[in-house]
Image (spheres, rainbow, N blue to C red):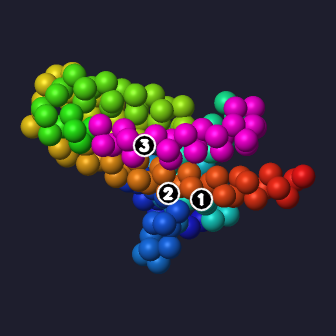
């Protein structure tokens, strides 16, 4: 068979798919690496799907398939994340490691609840940076959290619309 090319980066999402396919990449997978997902992408015969910044299958499994609850969680994230990012930037500008740690920890928990592994990882790194008072590294890490938050938010906006459409078609 043909050798499959799988690209991996910090936040593989649907907007990247066209450019990557044009470059000859068969699939994208987000970090952290999921060996089972990588194996499935490499070994399957049909064209693999792009894995987004939110593992919708995982979150829906944990929510017993409750798409309404998923939509509510997504909307809460969309409403709350701008304030959280503002709090991170304020803590950063004040050199407040304690507040930086607190907000990063809260965002890490939210990312875990939403099955958003790249955001979870970025927020966890920022949290550890703040715990260890390595504030010289914090601006880059805050930017990474902001970038991942933007990717998750864009993905969730789309997913909520799709979920609402599926729910209305089912009724």
- Residue depicted at 64% across the width and 40% down the height: 72
Q: What is the distance, in whole Å, between disc 1 and disc 2 at their CAs?
A: 7 Å
| Horizontal side of residue 71 vs 148, given as left or right | right
Give the labeled residue for mark 3: 81
Identify whether 3 is placed above or below 63.
Answer: below
Earlier in the chain: of badge 3 and badge 2, it is 3
User: Residue at 42% of width from left, 43% of height from top?
Assistant: 81
- Distance from label 3 to label 2 (Cα)? 12 Å
The residue under label 1 is 158
Q: Is residue 122 above or below residue 102?
A: below
Q: Residue at x 75, y 32 (%)?
A: 64
Q: Quadrant of residue 96?
A: top left
List x then y, in percent, for residue 102. 31, 24
Report which quarter residue 151 is drawn in: bottom left
- Is the residue marked by circle 3 packed among few (<14), some (14-19), or many (20+) residues within 10 Å? some
Nearer the viewer's eye, disc 3 or disc 2?
Answer: 3
SS majority, magenta: helix
Q: Are marks 1 and 2 in contact (CB under 8 Å)?
A: yes
Residue indicated by mark 2: 154
Could you tell me residue 122's position as x and y percent? Answer: 33, 39
Left/right placement of residue 84 relative to residue 155 reads left
Q: Position of residue 20 (x, y in %)?
A: 45, 70
State how far apart marks 3 and 1 are (Cα): 16 Å
Between 48 and 86, the residue placed more toward the observer is 86
Of 100 and 113, the residue lying toward us = 100
Which secondary structure lies at badge 2? Answer: helix
Q: Dot 2, how many residues are within 10 Å of its Cα: few (below 14), some (14-19), or many (20+)?
A: some
Q: Which residues are magenta?
A: 63-87
> With respect to residue 1, does 157 lie above or below?
above
Residue 121 seen in the current view: no
Callout 3 secondary element: helix
Q: Earlier in the sequence, mark 3 or mark 1?
A: 3
């Amino acid at each position: 068979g043909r050798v499959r090319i799988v690209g991996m980066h910090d936040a593989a999402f649907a907007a990247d798919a066209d450019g990557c396919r044009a470059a000859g990449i068969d699939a994208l997978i987000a970090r952290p690496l999921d060996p089972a997902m990588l194996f499935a992408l490499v070994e399957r015969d049909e064209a693999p799907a792009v894995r987004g910044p939110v593992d919708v299958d995982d979150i829906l499994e944990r929510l017993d398939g409750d798409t309404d609850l998923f939509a509510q969680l997504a909307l809460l994230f969309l409403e709350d994340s701008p304030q959280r990012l503002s709090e991170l930037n304020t803590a950063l500008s004040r050199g407040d490691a304690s507040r930086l740690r607190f907000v990063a920890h809260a965002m890490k928990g939210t990312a875990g609840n939403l099955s958003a592994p790249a955001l979870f990882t970025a927020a966890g790194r920022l949290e550890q940076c703040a715990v260890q008072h390595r504030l010289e590294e914090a601006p880059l890490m805050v930017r990474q959290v902001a970038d991942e938050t933007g990717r998750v938010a864009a993905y969730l906006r789309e997913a909520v619309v799709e979920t609402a459409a599926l729910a209305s078609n089912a009724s």
